[in-house]
Amino acid sequence: MLLILNCLIEEKSVNDFNKAMAKHLEDLPVEYDIFRVRDAKSIPDLSKYTHLIISGSGASTLDDNSWDEDLKNIILHFVKNQKAILGICYGHQFLVKTLLGVEHIRKTANPEIGFAKIDIADNELFKGIDAPICCVAHYDEVFDLNEDFRVIARNRNCSVHAFQYKDLPIWGTQFHPEYGVKDVEDMGDEFSKEDPKFKEHFINELDNRDKLFQNKLIFRNFINSSKIHLRPHHLLCIQSYIGKGYSEEFVENMDTVVRSLRENKDQIIRIIEGNDHVCKYCPHNIDGAKCESDEKVITMDKKVLEHLEIAPGEYTYSYLLERLKEKLTEEAFQDICGDCEWYDLCH
Ligand code: SF4
């Protein structure tokens, strides 16, 4: 379930953003709620949401606004639970304000309004997208980010047009993937009234209108981003997990993974070979690539695949639970977990 926070101020802008989002989301398998950010306090239950989109705004992140504390708390809830976030323009800057500090936001020397070519890096958010051209409309920008923020897009006017936070499904885009030609025309009318230097700031690099269609993929990629990656034997560990593990950080991460699976049996799981979401905060994880007990855990992984008769790939959690129910006999359990140090706890 997706939560969209609309931070725009003027009624027309609020409605235009809602319409743009409805168009991008209509073909995607996701339900969503939209709230005005000023009403964020009244959102009844954050735990039901798996994804968060924070819109652009006529307000500046350099100012304090009445909703700041509520928005900050919502972001921290999503980050703590490793749920997916996409911040757009104001939302992109507000992520930096919350996770790093307002001192990393400034007035930009190169405001840009219109359509700009964006240079992108290889990243899950941009899967299927080639040389994008996107709506841009900003007078502020983020800068001097630390190593927690990987810069994944830039152009000649803006050195951080997009970032990914840590390795989490958390992204910010300074550009607007949601807006098309009519939106930019309307924006131009609005900005030209208030900005005496509007003509200097206007940019139009839209030499191929078809390019705008591919921006829809950013939303598809974002919605698909919260797949949980699991190595096969962790499917079994999850079943008997009681809050014990290799370190405090490990337990905190495992709590999140287990809770989200118990709450959502339709969660898509990608069964992978090698280190996964559970390994991420494990002290035995070597550089994210190997386990200190690689030989032992790879053998367990192989046995799980054999007994459940599945291959690496994507499944719903409910399907995998069915496979466990059907195939995990006492003999299979002994075969897979007989030599595991946690055996007594799970058995
Ligand atoms: S790194 Fe090794 S010990 Fe740690 S969770 Fe992954 S498989 Fe288990």
Image (cartoon, rainbow, N blue to C red):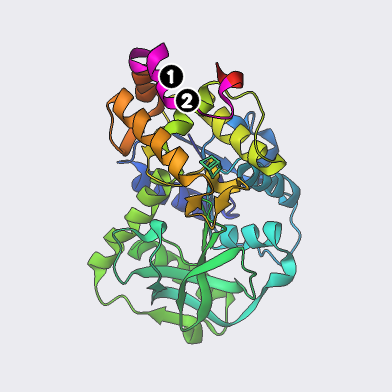
Residue 4 seen by the camera? no
- Please tell me how crowded label 2 is: few (under 14), some (14-19), or many (20+) other residues with Cα within 10 Å: many
Give yes or no for residue 334 being in the magenta stretch: yes
Q: How many marks?
A: 2
Instruction: Kindly identify which numbered label has been placed on residue 333.
Output: 1
Specify start and end residues of the magenta stretch as a single range.
325-343
Instruction: Kindly identify which numbered label has been placed on residue 337.
Output: 2
**Local secondary structure at mark 1:** helix
Is residue 260 or residue 10 the one in the foreground?
260
Instruction: Kindly identify which numbered label has been placed on residue 179.
Output: none
Q: Amino acid at mark 2?
A: Cys
**Quarter of image, ligand 1:** top right
On screen, residue 213 versus residue 333, left or right, reads left
Picture quadrant where residue 176 is located: bottom left
Quadrant including the C terminus: top right
Residue 232 percent coordinates (x, y): 40, 34
Residue 229 percent coordinates (x, y): 43, 41
Main SS, magenta region, reads: helix
Is residue 132 or residue 184 the one in the foreground?
132
Q: Residue at x 43, y 19 (%)?
A: 333
Residue 302 percent coordinates (x, y): 35, 35
Is residue 7 or residue 269 the one in the foreground?
269
Q: Amino acid at mark 1?
A: Phe
